[in-house]
Image (cartoon, rainbow, N blue to C red):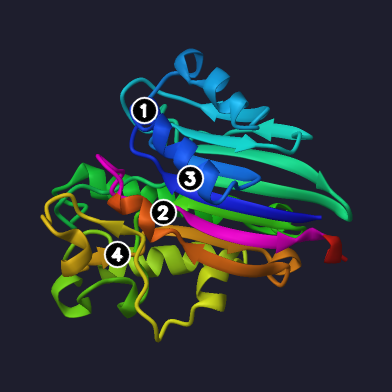
Amino acid sequence: MTITLATWNINSIRPRLHHVEQFNADRAPDILCLQETKVINDQFPTASLKKLGYEHYAINGQKSYHGVAILSRIPFAKVDMRGFCDKGDARHVEVTIDTDKGPLRIHNFYVPAGGDIPDPAVNDKFQHKLDFLEEMKSWLTGEETDNASILVGDLNIAPHENDVWSHKQLLKVVSHTPIEVEALAAVQAAGPWQDVVRNHIPVEHRLYSWWSYRSRDWSKADKGRRLDHIWATDAAADKVSGVEVYRDARSWEKPSDHAPVIAKLDMTQLA
């Protein structure tokens, strides 16, 4: 059983539904995890998505802000979601699917961006981001990671030097500051989780999944950051046979500022 899974910060699902249709035509992932859907559950365009083959969906929506969803051609054995930091934000949803050799859990996260000032003493949004990561670290251990699990989403942190266009210039910019990088590393180590994108594309190579709208010619300037991630537990990581950042989507008309990240998993090999 081979599964193609993609994660994508769509930056509002309803005005960019045609982009999901285009992505489906180009790559047809079996499971599509979306962030920043920006719509309440009742207004999520499920009817249109079912026409693309996504018969199964798990939605944690919120009006105008945040929101995550998992769309799937494969039935769900279980759906769940978790709140973080007592904020009432829709930032997590998870599903479990049955594969040929056992269950696979998939977590979809939208980590807070953190505002503009990387100082929790003066920026509540940055403190929220650090608190959110601390809760992730405390939760995603032990039973959560003993079996085959995948964690995807817009984690809003570019951890490695080659995950940003300029390590030196972005050291004091939110998403690449040392305190955020250390906090994300702690979440990863607590699992433990493997960064399967960097397993396949070594850190020596520059790799981005987000480019600012502020750049008139974003592709030529290429001042990107790798904010979108796919992690896996040890029981699932070696089943990932390939990864791709689908950069073409960033060049579509009125695009999201994020590009989809794709992984292929051969679940027939699960122990």
Occupied quadrant, residue 112: top left
Along the line of sight, which residue is nearer the eye, 15 or 76? Answer: 15
Reading the chain from its start, which is encountered first: label 1 or label 2?
1
**Callout 3: few (<14), some (14-19), or many (20+) C-alpha neighbours within 10 Å?**
some
Reading the chain from its start, which is encountered first: label 4 or label 1?
1
Residue 188 is situated, as x and y percent measured from the top left of the image, at: 53, 66
Question: Pointer 3 and pointer 1: residues touching (CB < 8 Å)?
Answer: no
Q: Spatial distance from mark 3 to mark 2, Cα to Cα?
A: 21 Å
Which span of residues is magenta-colored? 252-267
Occupied quadrant, residue 173: bottom left
Q: In the rendered structure, find residue 23 and report the number of the disc placed on it.
A: 3
Q: Secondary structure at mark 1?
A: loop
Q: Nearer the viewer, mark 3 or mark 4?
A: 3
Q: Nearer the viewer, mark 1 or mark 2?
A: 1
Q: Is residue 178 above or below residue 218?
A: below
Residue 168 is situated, as x and y percent measured from the top left of the image, at: 17, 79
Extreme residue in the top direction: 42
Extreme residue in the front direction: 25
Tag 4 residue: 225
Q: Could you tell me the amino acid type at mark 3?
A: Phe
**Callout 2: few (<14), some (14-19), or many (20+) C-alpha neighbours within 10 Å?**
many
Q: Nearer the viewer, mark 3 or mark 1?
A: 3
Q: Could you tell me the amino acid type at mark 4?
A: Arg
Tag 1 residue: 38
Tag 2 residue: 155
Reading the chain from its start, which is encountered first: label 3 or label 1?
3
Q: Residue at x 68, y 32 (%)?
A: 79
Asked whether residue 37 appears in the rendered view, the answer is yes
Q: Residue at x 62, y 39 (%)?
A: 94
